[in-house]
């Protein structure tokens, strides 16, 4: 590999590529961690619950768990410090930890319920992105990639989802600002907007979920592995290229024409 090619690579020659995946104990986070590990990445598995992280680690050889509540600045600092101490650098953050909140009429949503969703989906995403940005800016070779987990709800809402929808719209702004501010430091940032991946979080879609017209309907879902492959493809690009926004969804889900 030439010097120019090495500078354009998503990782330097030598040690394995290093990723942090938040929300790695289940669902999309677990699937992405497994996919990256299979592709030769070393993956730091972040999440609140140690036992699910250990389960993910058994499925993703070479990964290691780091319990972390992304709503706590001290936890986030400790997470990225642990990665730096163990691995020496950071090539990818998959900013994935998220919470949906209760599906209740807007007027019945308690402020504490609203705040709990905002704390995870927005404050947590910011704290992790900030810590990753700092490390990628300071390391040598400089640079890295941040992939934020947006949602179809970053574009159009579901009924009774104001907290989730507001935070996912905010995630789009976070992605754009990170992408712009990262330009001088070879830090690329993109967003994956996911629709109806088959996880525990989307179990309601397979039994019937409220539609905008007031009916309840079963919605198609896709294999979460398809999401993981998409994130992996984004991660493998050279830092001179970036998928700014990607939408991956169950083909026949009610997104185009939702509402």
Image (cartoon, rainbow, N blue to C red):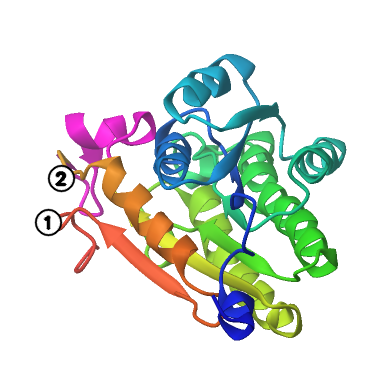
Tell me the crowding category of disc 2: few under 14, some 14 to 19, or many 20 or more residues within 10 angstroms, Cα based.
Answer: some
Classify residue 87 as left or right of residue 160. Answer: right
Q: Nearer the viewer, residue 93 or 28?
A: 93
Residue located beneath label 2 in the image? 220
Is residue 197 visible in the rendered image? The answer is no
| Callout 1: SS | loop
Q: Residue at x 15, y 58 (%)?
A: 251
First along the sequence among labels 2 and 1: 2
Q: Relative to the observer, which residue lies in front, 87 or 120?
A: 87
Q: Which residues are magenta?
A: 198-216
Residue 249, by quadrant, is bottom left
Q: What is the CA distance from the residue labelled 2 to the residue labelled 1?
A: 6 Å
Q: Are marks 2 and 1 in contact (CB under 8 Å)?
A: yes
**Horizontally, is 230 left or right of 94 in the view?**
left
- Residue, disc 1: 252
In the picture, the quarter occupied by the N terminus is bottom right
Image quadrant where residue 152 sits: bottom left
In this view, 230 is above or below 21: below
User: Alpha-carbon neighbours of circle 1 within 10 Å: few (<14), some, or many (≥20)?
Assistant: few
Q: Secondary structure at mark 2?
A: loop
* In this picture, residue 255 sits left or right of residue 188: left
Quick check: 226 left or right of 116?
left
Q: Does the stretch in magenta take in 211?
A: yes
- Label total for image: 2
């Amino acid at each position: 590999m030439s010097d120019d090619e090495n500078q354009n690579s998503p990782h330097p020659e030598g040690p394995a590529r290093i990723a942090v995946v938040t929300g790695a104990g289940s669902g999309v986070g677990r699937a992405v961690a497994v996919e990256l590990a299979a592709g030769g990445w070393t993956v730091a598995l972040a999440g609140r619950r140690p036992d699910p992280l250990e389960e993910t680690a058994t499925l993703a050889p070479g990964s290691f768990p780091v319990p972390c509540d992304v709503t706590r600045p001290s936890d986030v600092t400790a997470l990225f410090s642990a990665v730096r101490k163990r691995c020496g650098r950071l090539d990818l953050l998959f900013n994935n930890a998220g919470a949906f909140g209760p599906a209740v009429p807007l007027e019945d949503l308690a402020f504490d319920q609203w705040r709990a969703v905002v704390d995870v989906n927005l404050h947590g995403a910011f704290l992790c992105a900030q810590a990753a940005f700092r490390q990628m800016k300071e390391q040598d070779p400089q640079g890295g990639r941040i992939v934020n987990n947006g949602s179809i709800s970053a574009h159009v809402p579901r009924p009774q989802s104001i907290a989730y929808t507001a935070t996912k719209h905010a995630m789009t702004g976070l992605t754009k600002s990170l992408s712009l501010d990262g330009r001088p430091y070879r830090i690329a940032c993109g967003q994956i907007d996911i629709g109806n991946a088959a996880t525990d979080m989307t179990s309601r879609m397979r039994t019937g979920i409220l539609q905008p017209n007031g009916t309840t309907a079963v919605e198609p879902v896709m294999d979460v592995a398809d999401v993981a492959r998409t994130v992996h493809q984004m991660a493998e690009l050279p830092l001179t290229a970036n998928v700014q926004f990607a939408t991956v969804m169950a083909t026949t889900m009610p997104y185009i024409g939702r509402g």
